[in-house]
Amino acid sequence: MFGHDFRWDHLALTRRELLARCGMGLGSLALGPLLSGATQAASLGINPLAARPPHFAAKAKHVIHLFMNGGPSHVDTFDPKPLLAQYAGKDLPGGNLKTERPTGAAFPSPFKFQKYGQSGIEVSELFAHTAASIDEIAVIRSMYADVPNHEPSLSLMNCGTARQIRPSLGSWVTYGLGTDNQNLPAFVAMCPGGYPIQESQNWQAAFLPGVFQGTYLDTQHTAIERLIEHIRNERLPLDGQRRQLDLLQALNQRHQQARQQDAELEARIQSFELAYRMQSEAAEVFDVSREPQHILDMYGPGVQARQILIARRLVERGVRFVQLWHGAGQPWDNHDDIEVRHRALAKECDQAIGALLKDLKQRGLLEETLVIWGGEFGRTPAVEMPKEGSNAGKINGRDHNHYGFTMWLAGGGVRGGYVHGATDEFGFRAVENRVHVHDLHATLLHLLGFDHERLTYRYAGRDFRLTDVHGTVVKELVI
């Protein structure tokens, strides 16, 4: 009588659903060509994480982002400033070098620098293991950001904007490229001991489909059941879970079809599928005890060494973007006792970073893996004046400095053994070949094969991109 199968759920339309079905048909047809590839894929039931080619050929296929949370001091790590020793205890020319708080006299680095590699680039003793691969590294000594505060600077470095909710770099990369391994998350964020400042906003998908958000792991845990919650089902075997999941997916898809293929629903459906598939591969990839002893010895002991080794194992298996946080809170935020604290922090990660670069190279992975090192800003060359509560009575630390700081890149089409730009003679402000965070993002996307002006997502009536309306590719950093 009706010419099609009768369904009871069609009798329970809301007013919104009725209007949508009656009046939005032609509009939906017109909207299709305007949607992004990933959104179209989701609406058609195609896996939005399927591997996709970039705009043009590129060597970099994966990213490992070593995030030194809190702002490491560039003048104590990769930007030597010997002139500070001549002014030790004296005011620097040009007046008070204030960023967020009052500063005092010049504070020379307590660490020794020396030249490494054929390039002869100077690096602090704090990162001697990393410096052994300096000929693979491009050091950017002329970075600058917008403000000297953690929250907006973390947002700017990770999401391309200091104030508004925007997708993170890892989300943009996985949106553009998908992933080569459907049994593991495309984007992994590892932070031992809990969340950093801004928490999951640092790896958020924002208005991109939720499937592109980073998967957080607390790598202080070694047991797979604690590292990844609910990784195993204690009640059902895999075939039983598959039948249960098939029923759940059928119900979810029926619900989704009645709601114009809602992207959030699609993200949830994909997350259930990924959780099921991860059971077969996650336990193996996160178990570093499967590595030969000489590899474990090369990376060294500790949480940082383990998570850096896990990063190599992830990209080796096709994971697209891995971000490693050096602890929760503000570990590199040393407003006092910088000599003791920076030395301890570098000891936790330097050996493993050096091992990572060598290990990637010996496996033939460095040329296709882009490694990024840095924090959200640097620190002042002048000492921070003591105040009540934090560094009271201490004159041995540095304040935040967004005017000039250092980051470095390696692998993935990067020009190794190269120093780009410079801060002034004291290390306070970037003055030569300055690189804003937007320029860095444009360059990273270029190395991954994207024109940063064309990698866009339509939202709220406009096309958004990681670099917003800014950014210039730093061609000197590219081979």
Image (tube, helix red, strand yellow):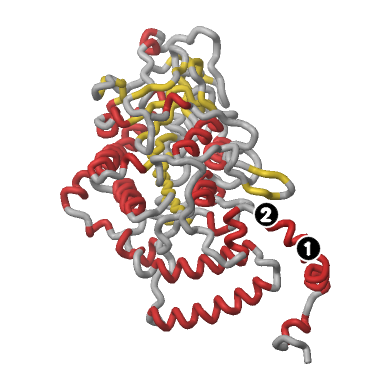
Furthest-bottom residue in this view: 1
Classify the position of the C terminus by image quarter. top left
Residue 189 in the image: above or below residue 433: below
Q: Amino acid at mark 2?
A: Pro
User: Would you name the residue on which mark 1 appears?
Assistant: 26
Q: Is residue 476 left or right of residue 358?
A: right
> Residue at the spot x=51%, y=65% of the render?
271
Q: Amino acid at mark 1?
A: Leu
Res. 143 in view: yes
> Residue at the spot x=77%, y=81% of the render?
12
Point out residue 17 in the picture as x, y percentages from the top left corner. Answer: 78, 71
Of helix, strand and loop, which one carries label 2? Answer: helix
Classify the position of the N terminus by image quarter. bottom right
Residue 317 in the image: above or below residue 327: below
User: Would you name the residue on which mark 2 appears?
Assistant: 33
Point out residue 344 in the picture as x, y percentages from the top left corner. Answer: 32, 36
- Residue 57 quadrant: top left
Res. 394 in view: no
Q: Nearer the viewer, residue 62 or 166?
A: 62
> Residue at the spot x=64%, y=77% of the render?
254
Point out residue 21 in the picture as x, y percentages from the top left corner. Answer: 78, 71
In the image, which disc is placed on residue 326? none
Q: Nearer the viewer, residue 370 or 323?
A: 370
Mark 1–mark 2 distance (CA, rounded to whole Å):
13 Å
> Residue at the spot x=69%, y=50% of the render?
459
Q: Is residue 59 left or right of residue 298?
A: right
- Residue 222 quadrant: bottom left
Of helix, strand and loop, which one carries label 1? Answer: helix
Q: Is residue 249 left or right of residue 219?
A: right
Point out residue 88 in the picture as x, y percentages from the top left corner. Answer: 39, 12
Q: Earlier in the sequence, mark 1 or mark 2?
A: 1
